[in-house]
Amino acid sequence: MHKPAAKTQLKHLRTSDLRGLAQLATQATVGVTRIVEGVHQSIWNTLGVPGGKTPGQTGGITGLVYRSIDTVTQLLGKGVDSLLVRLQPRLESAAQSEARNTPARSGSGRTQWRDGRPLARQQKPLRHPDDAALSG
Protein backbone atom coordinates (compact mmCIF):
# COMPACT_ATOMS: atom_id res chain seq x y z
CA MET A 1 0.00 0.00 0.00
CA HIS A 2 1.22 3.52 -0.83
CA LYS A 3 2.23 5.67 2.15
CA PRO A 4 1.77 9.47 1.91
CA ALA A 5 4.98 11.50 1.76
CA ALA A 6 6.06 12.97 5.06
CA LYS A 7 6.39 16.74 5.32
CA THR A 8 10.11 16.38 5.94
CA GLN A 9 10.57 14.84 2.49
CA LEU A 10 9.40 18.07 0.83
CA LYS A 11 11.64 20.47 2.74
CA HIS A 12 14.16 20.54 -0.10
CA LEU A 13 11.66 22.41 -2.31
CA ARG A 14 12.07 26.16 -2.63
CA THR A 15 9.57 28.77 -3.67
CA SER A 16 11.53 29.20 -6.88
CA ASP A 17 10.93 25.49 -7.57
CA LEU A 18 7.20 26.02 -7.14
CA ARG A 19 7.34 29.05 -9.43
CA GLY A 20 9.12 27.01 -12.07
CA LEU A 21 6.56 24.24 -11.74
CA ALA A 22 3.70 26.74 -12.08
CA GLN A 23 5.32 28.29 -15.16
CA LEU A 24 5.86 24.86 -16.67
CA ALA A 25 2.22 23.93 -16.04
CA THR A 26 1.06 27.20 -17.62
CA GLN A 27 3.22 26.72 -20.69
CA ALA A 28 2.14 23.10 -21.03
CA THR A 29 -1.54 24.00 -20.80
CA VAL A 30 -1.19 26.73 -23.41
CA GLY A 31 0.84 24.43 -25.67
CA VAL A 32 -1.59 21.53 -25.43
CA THR A 33 -4.51 23.88 -26.06
CA ARG A 34 -2.82 25.18 -29.23
CA ILE A 35 -2.16 21.64 -30.43
CA VAL A 36 -5.78 20.65 -29.83
CA GLU A 37 -6.97 23.78 -31.62
CA GLY A 38 -4.69 23.02 -34.58
CA VAL A 39 -6.04 19.48 -34.85
CA HIS A 40 -9.58 20.85 -34.50
CA GLN A 41 -9.00 23.32 -37.32
CA SER A 42 -7.34 20.73 -39.55
CA ILE A 43 -10.47 18.59 -39.24
CA TRP A 44 -12.59 21.63 -40.12
CA ASN A 45 -10.29 22.28 -43.11
CA THR A 46 -10.96 18.80 -44.50
CA LEU A 47 -14.67 19.65 -44.36
CA GLY A 48 -14.11 22.97 -46.11
CA VAL A 49 -14.87 25.17 -43.08
CA PRO A 50 -12.69 28.33 -42.98
CA GLY A 51 -10.42 28.92 -40.03
CA GLY A 52 -9.47 31.91 -37.95
CA LYS A 53 -7.22 34.85 -38.79
CA THR A 54 -4.01 32.81 -38.65
CA PRO A 55 -3.34 29.28 -39.92
CA GLY A 56 -4.15 26.56 -37.39
CA GLN A 57 -6.58 28.73 -35.45
CA THR A 58 -10.29 28.18 -35.35
CA GLY A 59 -12.81 30.93 -35.93
CA GLY A 60 -16.23 31.84 -34.62
CA ILE A 61 -17.43 30.62 -31.25
CA THR A 62 -14.90 27.78 -31.28
CA GLY A 63 -12.06 30.26 -31.73
CA LEU A 64 -13.51 32.40 -28.94
CA VAL A 65 -13.47 29.41 -26.62
CA TYR A 66 -9.83 28.62 -27.43
CA ARG A 67 -8.80 32.29 -27.00
CA SER A 68 -10.63 32.34 -23.65
CA ILE A 69 -8.84 29.21 -22.45
CA ASP A 70 -5.51 30.74 -23.49
CA THR A 71 -6.26 34.07 -21.78
CA VAL A 72 -7.51 32.51 -18.54
CA THR A 73 -4.52 30.16 -18.42
CA GLN A 74 -2.08 33.04 -18.91
CA LEU A 75 -3.82 35.15 -16.25
CA LEU A 76 -3.83 32.32 -13.73
CA GLY A 77 -0.18 31.57 -14.44
CA LYS A 78 0.82 35.21 -13.92
CA GLY A 79 -1.32 35.39 -10.78
CA VAL A 80 0.26 32.30 -9.24
CA ASP A 81 3.73 33.56 -10.17
CA SER A 82 3.20 36.98 -8.61
CA LEU A 83 1.70 35.40 -5.49
CA LEU A 84 4.71 33.12 -5.08
CA VAL A 85 7.10 36.05 -5.59
CA ARG A 86 5.37 37.92 -2.76
CA LEU A 87 5.32 34.88 -0.49
CA GLN A 88 8.90 33.82 -1.24
CA PRO A 89 10.56 35.64 1.71
CA ARG A 90 8.02 34.17 4.12
CA LEU A 91 8.18 30.62 2.80
CA GLU A 92 11.90 30.22 2.53
CA SER A 93 13.90 29.51 5.64
CA ALA A 94 17.34 28.36 6.63
CA ALA A 95 15.92 24.89 7.24
CA GLN A 96 14.82 24.61 3.61
CA SER A 97 18.22 25.67 2.32
CA GLU A 98 19.96 23.22 4.62
CA ALA A 99 17.67 20.36 3.60
CA ARG A 100 18.25 21.08 -0.08
CA ASN A 101 22.05 21.25 0.21
CA THR A 102 22.55 18.01 2.12
CA PRO A 103 23.56 14.97 0.08
CA ALA A 104 20.75 12.71 -1.10
CA ARG A 105 20.33 9.60 0.98
CA SER A 106 19.17 6.21 -0.14
CA GLY A 107 16.60 4.20 1.78
CA SER A 108 19.41 2.66 3.84
CA GLY A 109 20.55 6.11 5.04
CA ARG A 110 23.75 6.09 2.99
CA THR A 111 24.81 9.06 0.91
CA GLN A 112 24.34 8.56 -2.82
CA TRP A 113 27.63 9.16 -4.60
CA ARG A 114 28.40 9.70 -8.25
CA ASP A 115 31.90 10.21 -9.63
CA GLY A 116 33.39 10.23 -6.15
CA ARG A 117 31.28 13.17 -4.92
CA PRO A 118 27.92 13.40 -3.18
CA LEU A 119 25.09 14.23 -5.60
CA ALA A 120 24.26 17.53 -3.91
CA ARG A 121 27.81 18.88 -4.30
CA GLN A 122 28.12 18.44 -8.05
CA GLN A 123 27.50 21.30 -10.47
CA LYS A 124 24.55 19.43 -11.97
CA PRO A 125 23.54 17.02 -9.22
CA LEU A 126 21.19 14.85 -11.27
CA ARG A 127 23.29 14.67 -14.42
CA HIS A 128 25.63 11.79 -14.99
CA PRO A 129 28.60 12.10 -17.41
CA ASP A 130 27.11 9.27 -19.48
CA ASP A 131 23.99 11.41 -20.06
CA ALA A 132 25.97 13.68 -22.40
CA ALA A 133 26.95 10.70 -24.52
CA LEU A 134 23.31 9.61 -24.78
CA SER A 135 22.04 13.04 -25.77
CA GLY A 136 24.37 13.16 -28.78
Image (spheres, helix red, strand yellow):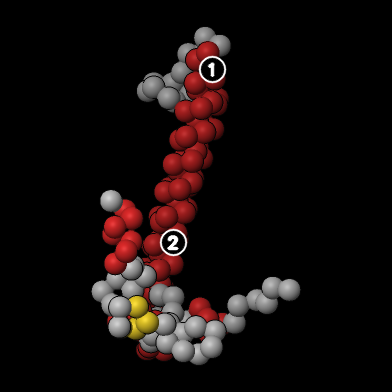
Report, in whole angstroms, how far the alpha carbon at label 1 lies from the one at label 2.
34 Å
**For residue 98, what is the image quadrant?**
bottom left
The amino acid type, in three-letter code, at marker 2 is: Leu
Give the left or right position of residue 8, taking residue 30 as reference: right
* Numbered disc 2: secondary structure: helix
Q: Check disc 2: other Cα within 10 Å, few if <14, some if 14-19, many if 20+.
A: few
Furthest-left residue in this view: 123
Question: Residue 83, relative to residue 27: is it above or below?
Answer: below
Is residue 97 in view? no
Q: Nearer the viewer, residue 59 or 41?
A: 41
Q: Nearer the viewer, residue 46 or 93?
A: 46
Image point (37%, 82%), residue name:
113
Earlier-in-chain disc, 1 versus 2:
2
Numbered-mark total? 2
In the picture, which quadrant includes the N terminus?
bottom right
Question: Residue 61, relative to residue 87: is it above or below?
Answer: above
Image point (42%, 82%), residue name:
112
Give the left or right position of residue 64, taking residue 87 as reference: right
* Numbered disc 1: secondary structure: helix
The amino acid type, in three-letter code, at marker 1 is: Trp
The residue pinned by badge 2 equals 21
The residue pinned by badge 1 equals 44
Task: Residue 21: give x, y in percent of width and height.
Answer: 44, 61
Give the left or right position of residue 30, taking residue 119 as reference: right
Image point (29%, 67%), residue name:
129
Image point (34%, 83%), residue name:
118
Task: Residue 79: give x, y in percent of width and height.
Answer: 43, 57
